[in-house]
Amino acid sequence: MKYQICSKLYGSWNKISHLKPNATTIKPRLLMLGDCFPLHNDFIIKDSKQLRDFCSNNWERVYVLPGIVEICGIGTHSWMNNMDKFEKFIHQAPNSNMVVMNNTEHHDGDNILIGSTFWCGGGPSTFINEAASNIIKRHPQLTIKDVNNWAKDDAEFMGTSIKNAILQKKKLTVCTYFSPQFMTDTVLEIFRKQLEHCASSIKGEWYTAQS
């Protein structure tokens, strides 16, 4: 399955207004890997609706991954309220063809699409890695405990889902907001544990919004 990919479009409608489905793709799919749909005020929501409807009308299927903007807003909204609002917003797409990937997997033809924000984790209480530290500074409603809990949940989901797909001999498309390179040792160990006794290699791609 072929996918087009984008991320970090918030506040920049002109970045996608020229983007069209790939003419060589029979059934065009779009992967939006986070930081595309802020919902923190009426003016911004209007732009986000324009982007959402444009994507819904131009691609057969759109998979949307929550990034920092969707989960945390701009440092003023709580995580739970913002995520509920975000999922409702995406489900109101005009063609009902947009899917939120929030620790979920989707069977798309012969491909398994796995999506997670894949939080990096903050390490032990005496050390916070740079990625987590910067997030918490910009979003004071978060704590290191929040980040570590989400990182643990995401690592368990990702490891289990990837292992199941490998055992089924399915082709994988893995989508995350954070890159695996940002994982702390604790999170990496959880991820590896889920893949124990799985000798086969992964067949597919891993796409991320972070380099």
Image (spheres, rainbow, N blue to C red):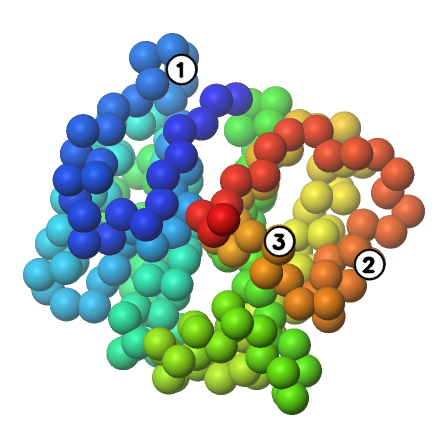
Secondary structure of the residue carrying numbered label 2: helix
Q: Is residue 187 above or below residue 21?
A: below
Instruction: Name the front one of labels 1 and 3.
Output: 3
Q: Is residue 37 above or below residue 30?
A: below
Q: Of the residues shown, which amino acid type is indicated by label 2?
A: Lys
Mark seen at residue 25: 1
Mark seen at residue 80: none
**Image position, residue 104 (x, y; %):** 55, 49
Could you tell me if residue 103 is visible in this image? no
Please tell me which of labels 1 and 3 falls first in the chain. Answer: 1
Q: CA distance from mark 1 to mark 3?
A: 29 Å
Q: Quadrant of residue 119?
A: bottom right
Q: Of the residues shown, which amino acid type is indicated by label 3?
A: Pro
Judging depth in this view, the residue of 16 and 111 nearest the camera is: 16
Q: Residue at x 10, y 64 (%)?
A: 42
Could you tell me if residue 134 is visible in this image? yes
Q: Residue at x 14, y 59 (%)?
A: 44
Q: Residue at x 32, y 50 (%)?
A: 8
Secondary structure of the residue carrying numbered label 3: helix
Q: Quadrant of residue 37?
A: bottom left
Q: Quadrant of residue 107?
A: top right
**Image position, residue 111 (x, y; %):** 60, 27
Mark seen at residue 180: 3
Mark 2 residue crowding within 10 angstroms, few (<14) / some (14–19) / many (20+):
some
**Image position, residue 138 (x, y; %):** 35, 76
Q: Of the residues shown, which amino acid type is indicated by label 1?
A: Thr
Residue that protrudes farthest toward the bottom in the picture: 126
Q: Which residue is mark 2?
A: 193
